[in-house]
Image (cartoon, rainbow, N blue to C red):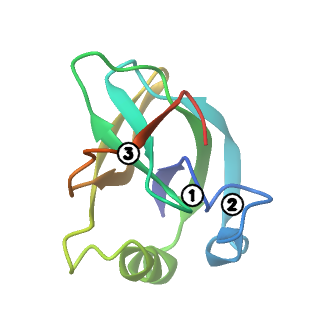
Amino acid sequence: MTRVFVYGTLKRGCENHRWIDSQRFVGVAKTKPVYRLYDLGGYPGMVKAKDGVAVEGELWDVNPASLSRLDVLEDVAGGEYERAPIELESGQAEGYLYLRSIDGCRDCGTSW
């Protein structure tokens, strides 16, 4: 199992939650204030930032097969996101960082 931090459409009650609803919910979490969250038009993207905030999200324990499916959803192979270590207030998990330009995108503050 891999501990994964989610901050957007994968969270409980959101449109892509079905991609992880069979996995184990660990709890709510916040990142260290080293990230920014942007509205990409229907879904968010999180990037590292010098003027970061503590982004709110959820932690999930995800099995290898579901993690591979998440990589497809997040277009890791196509270069939209990368799965990377995420610095949390209470440790570390993996999560998805947005790789493309955020120029013109609205800052979402601490949550999506």
Q: Earlier in the sequence, mark 2 or mark 3?
A: 2
Residue 53 drawn above or below residue 60: above
Quadrant that contains the C terminus: top right
Q: Which residue is mark 3?
A: 105
Q: Which residue is mark 2?
A: 24
Q: Residue 51 is drawn in which quadrant?
A: top left
- Say which mark, if any, is on residue 61: 1
Q: Residue 25 is drawn in which quadrant?
A: bottom right
Residue 16 drawn above or below residue 36: below
The residue drawn where x is 39% and y is 80% is: 68
Marks 3 and 1 in Cβ contact (< 8 Å): no
Left/right placement of residue 29 relative to residue 15 reads: left
**Which residue ends up furthest to the right in the rendered image?**
13
Q: CA distance from mark 2 to mark 3?
A: 32 Å
Query: From the viewer's perspective, is the residue at label 3 or at label 1 nearer?
Result: 3
Residue 10 drawn above or below residue 56: below
Q: CA distance from mark 3 to mark 1?
A: 30 Å
The residue nearer to you, when weighing 80 against 6, is 80
The residue drawn where x is 68% and y is 60% is: 24
Which element carries disc 1, helix, strand or loop?
strand
